[in-house]
Image (cartoon, rainbow, N blue to C red):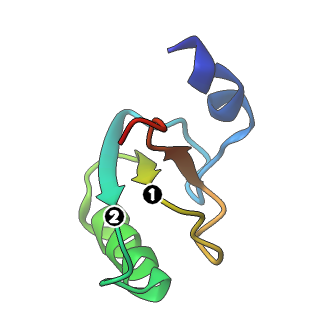
Amino acid sequence: MKFLQKELEVMSDPRGTQPTWQCVMVCWGDKYPVSLINHLMGEIERHAPTCPRFVLICDEPKPGLRNDAITRDFPPFF
């Protein structure tokens, strides 16, 4: 988890608290637009009892994602 340590230190949510759980999503291909991914993250955050951290594993860059989303690339062997 050391690779996320820096992101956790600088990341803050609108409520001003640190994340207590994480939501990991896989974004493969272009079926779902970034606006829908952002909307999904907003709805999850709105309905969650505590603040989540969003981690997206992507096959390609997704410009326009929310600033609080942490993105990771698939390893090259995929």
Task: Tell me if 31 is positioned left or right of 71 in this view.
Answer: left
Q: Residue at x 65, y 74 (%)?
A: 63
Which residue in the rendered view is the most extreme toward the front?
Answer: 77
Percent of width and height locating residue 73: 51, 45
Percent of width and height locating residue 2: 59, 12
Task: Tell me if 16 is positioned left or right of 60 in this view.
Answer: right
Image: 31 above or below 76:
below
Question: Mark 1 = which residue?
Answer: 59
- Please state which amino acid type lies under the numbered disc 1: Asp
Q: CA distance from mark 1 to mark 2?
A: 5 Å
Percent of width and height locating residue 69: 55, 55
Q: Residue at x 60, y 56 (%)?
A: 68
- Please state which amino acid type lies under the numbered disc 2: Trp
Q: Residue at x 53, y 62 (%)?
A: 60
Find numbered disc 2 in the image and state the secondary structure of the residue it sits on. loop
Image: 10 above or below 12:
above
Mark nearer the N terminus (1 vs 2): 2
The quadrant of the image that shows the C terminus is top left
Q: Residue 48's quadrant in the figure? A: bottom left
Q: Residue 17's quadrant in the figure? A: top right
Q: Residue 31's quadrant in the figure? A: bottom left
Task: Tell me if 28 is positioned left or right of 4 in this view.
Answer: left
Q: Give me the disc on residue 28.
A: 2
Please tell me which residue lies in front, 26 or 6: 26
| Mark 1: few/some/many CA within 10 Å (<14, 14-19, 20+) | some
Please report contact status of discs 1 and 2: CB closer than 8 Å, yes or no: yes
